[in-house]
Amino acid sequence: MIADLQSDCKNCFGLCCVALPYGKSADFPFNKAGGQPCRNLCSNNSCSIHDLLREKGFRGCVSYECFGAGQHVSQFIYNGKDWREDFEHAEEMFAVFPLVQQLHEMLWYLKQALTLKETQSFQASLQKIYKETVELTEKKPKEILEIDIAAHRSNVNVLLVETSKRYRADLIKRGKKRRIKEDFDYLGANLKGLDLQGEDFRGKLLIAANLSHSDLRKADFIGADLRDANLRGANLTKALFLTQSQINAAIGDIHTKIPNYLEKPSHWLDKKFSEFIC
Ligand code: SF4
C-alpha cells in the first residue's frame, strides 16, 4: 500500500502541526502541547507562515519529516476523515500518527538498503522486514497503538547496521588509522576539509560542527543531529541514510554536493545567509 515515503502535506490533515508537542527553544518560539493545533495552522491545513518559518523562529518545522506518515494516517488509516469532523477519534489519530511516522522512517531506510548492491546477500531478510513493517502501518488504529515499536526498531536496526558495515567496508579496511576516535565530541567540532569518507556518524550530535569542504561520501548519517552543521562545499553524494530533514537542519551552499534523491533547501541558496556563516 505504501507508494510514497515522502510527505504530501496536501493530503494530510496537518497532523504534525497538531499531534506533536514543541517547546520554546532554538527551534520553536513558544510551547505547544501535543494535540493542540499550532496557532499558524490554517483551516485548509496549510501553514500561514510557510515561507517564513526560519525567520519566525520555527526552525524545528523546517527540519521535520514525516516520511509520508501524515497522508497515510489521514487518507488510509482514517479514510480521509479530518480530525475536525471526527472529534471522537481525534485524540486517537494524534497518538497513532507519531507511531506510523516511526514505522515510515524505518521503511525509508530499508528502502535505501534494498537499492544497494552491497546488501545482495541479505536482500531476502530486508524484503521480509520491509513487508512486515508495511503490514504494521496497515493495521487498525487500536492495533497500531499496541505495537512494540522499540522491539521492531531493534530488529530493523540489525539489518541497517549490517548494511552500513558492508556499504563502508572498503573504506573501513583502508582507514587503518582512524581520524576520529570513538568517543570524539562532535558538538561544534572543527572537521573542515577532512577526508571523512565512510565515517560512521550513526546517532552522533554534529550540532554546529564545521564539516565544510569535507569529503563525506559513503559516510553513515543515520540518526545524526546535523542542526546548524556547516556543510558548505562538502561532498555528501554517496552518503548513507541521509534524510531531507537532516539536510534542512544543516547549513550548506550551492557548492555542497548531496545525494540526487534530496533537494537543496532554499535557505542554502540565500546569499545573505550563507555569507554570514564562516
Ligand atoms: S509553524 Fe506552520 S509548519 Fe510549524 S507547526 Fe505551526 S502550522 Fe505547522
Image (tube, helix red, strand yellow):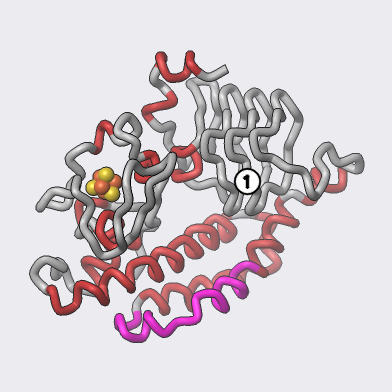
Q: Nearer the viewer, residue 137 or 45?
A: 45
The three-letter amino acid code for the residue at tag 1 is Leu
Is 31 above or below relative to 262? below
Say which residue appears at 23% left-offset and 56% top-offset.
14
Determine which residue is flagged by label 1.
205
Residue 128 shows up from this direction: no
Give residue 110's position: percent from left, percent from top.
Answer: 54, 62
Is 90 above or below relative to 62? below
User: Residue 268's image quarter?
Assistant: top left
Does the magenta-highlighted stretch encompass residue 66? no
Give residue 140's position: percent from left, percent from top.
Answer: 30, 83
Q: Quadrant of the C terminus?
A: top right
Q: Main secondary structure of the magenta part?
A: helix
Q: What is the span of residues highlighted in magenta in the rendered image?
A: 139-157
Does the magenta-highlighted stretch encompass residue 145? yes
Say which residue appears at 74% left-offset and 49% top-offset.
168
- Relative to 21, 239 lies left or right: right
Q: Quadrant of the N terminus?
A: bottom left
- Relative to 218, 31 lies left or right: left
Residue 106 shows up from this direction: yes
Give residue 22's position: percent from left, percent from top.
Answer: 36, 53
Say which residue appears at 55% left-offset and 74% top-offset.
150
Say which residue appears at 63% left-offset and 33% top-offset.
209
